[in-house]
């Protein structure tokens, strides 16, 4: 297991380095931040002073070297708009985004896996067909449209839930969280469901496919022949095997929930990283864009590492093959 983790850590370090180069290059070829930093009436001398202060007069490889050196110290530059460290702005918004993503992931697990197993065990039943039809809807409906319909129905027409914002928050593990208050939960419910719909549909289909494949295996038939109860067969023998692909995909999808919660956060005015990055792109705030992208890269790398470890625990053949290679 130690060799397996060390190998994955080395691969992760290489991925972060390559992605840092791509992020730096991609962001720095888009637009000219000097145009935003100086007024239209500024003379050439003022422009050159701003260029030197931002280090834009240096060759690209020197700028990249300085970027990496500063990033290793936790300095990704100051926001052009807010005048604060870009990393600090991102870190302040992380709890809101993580809270929304975790709530959506839990909904996908709690709703998607049982429905997928039911649809896999009784594929011809009417309830199973309803489940699969619902999963198709979850895949097909645009997230922004569903969010707007939620607001129209539950906030405007029925008045049951608030339409925007995060609600009351309380300190939890050093972060401000809203799920511990009733007002916060009422604000969290609609955006979490909106973000979770696609993932619920995905988990349903994964669990159904895994169940259909596993239920005909010899060890399931043998367990039935031994007289084991259906509950024990499902929860002990079937679930362990269908969870391997589900855990892998959910791990990657959690990164996707964080990275692509932009639409949901914008529709519901949820004060997370997604809304901040949209505002930063509109104002060409390079340091914040770079900080956001690097945080997302790190999150994906860490999640991939955790998923690999969990996968190797669920299926020891994975780490044995890695050691042999």
Image (cartoon, rainbow, N blue to C red):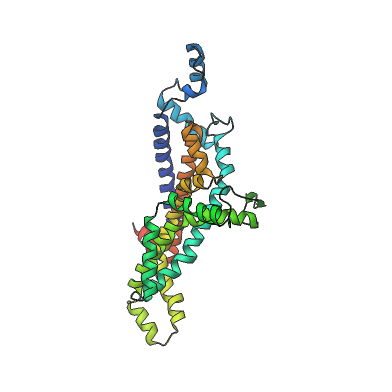
> Which residue is nearer to you in this view: 24 or 81?
81
Position in image of residue 180 (x %, y %)? 64, 57
Where does the image place residue 170, in percent across and percent down from the top left? Answer: 67, 52
The front one of 82 and 221 is 82
Q: From what the image shows, is residue 14 above or below residue 247?
A: above
What residue is rendered at 58% in x and 38% in y? 88
Q: Quadrant of the C terminus?
A: bottom left
Asked whether residue 124 appears in the rendered view, the answer is yes
Extreme-front residue of the structure? 157
> Looking at the image, which residue is at 47% across and 12% down?
44
Quarter holding the N terminus is: bottom left
In this rendering, position of residue 10 left or right of residue 165: left
- Above/below status of 17 relative to 315: above
Q: Answer above or below: position of 147 versus 132.
A: above
Q: Quadrant of residue 123?
A: bottom left
Q: Position of residue 21 (x, y in %)?
A: 40, 35
Residue 201 in the image: above or below residue 178: below
On the picture, is 91 further left or further right than 7? right
Which x, y percent locates residue 323? 38, 58
Would you say residue 308 is visible in this rendering?
no
Using the rendered view, name the quadrant where residue 86 is placed. top right
């Amino acid at each position: 297991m130690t060799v397996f983790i060390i190998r994955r850590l080395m691969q992760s370090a290489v991925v972060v380095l390559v992605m840092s180069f791509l992020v730096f290059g991609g962001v720095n070829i888009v637009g000219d931040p000097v145009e935003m930093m100086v007024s239209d009436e500024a003379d050439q001398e003022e422009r050159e002073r701003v260029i030197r202060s931002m280090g834009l007069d240096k060759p690209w490889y020197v700028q990249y070297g300085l970027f990496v050196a500063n990033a290793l110290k936790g300095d990704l530059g100051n926001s052009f708009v807010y005048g604060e460290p870009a990393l600090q702005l991102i870190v302040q918004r992380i709890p809101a985004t993580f809270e929304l993503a975790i709530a959506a992931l839990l909904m996908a697990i709690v709703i998607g896996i049982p429905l997928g197993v039911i649809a896999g065990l009784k594929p011809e039943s009417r309830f199973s067909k309803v489940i699969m039809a619902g999963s198709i809807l979850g895949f097909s409906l645009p997230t922004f449209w569903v969010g707007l319909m939620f607001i129209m129905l539950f906030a405007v027409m029925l008045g049951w839930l608030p339409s925007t914002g995060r609600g009351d928050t309380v300190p939890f593990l050093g972060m401000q969280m809203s799920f511990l208050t009733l007002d916060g939960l009422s604000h969290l419910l609609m955006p979490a469901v909106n973000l979770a719909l696609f993932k619920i549909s995905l988990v349903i289909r994964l669990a159904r496919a895994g169940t259909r494949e596993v239920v005909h295996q010899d060890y399931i038939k043998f367990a039935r022949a031994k007289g084991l109860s259906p509950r024990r067969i499902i929860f002990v023998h079937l679930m362990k095997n269908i969870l391997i692909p589900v855990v892998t995909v959910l791990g990657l999808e959690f990164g996707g929930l964080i990275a692509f919660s932009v639409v949901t956060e914008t529709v519901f005015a949820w004060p997370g990283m997604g809304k901040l990055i949209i505002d930063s792109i509109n104002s060409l705030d390079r340091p914040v864009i770079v900080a956001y992208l690097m945080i997302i890269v790190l999150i994906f790398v860490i999640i991939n590492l955790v998923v690999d470890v969990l996968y190797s625990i669920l299926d020891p053949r994975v780490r044995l093959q890695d050691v042999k290679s």
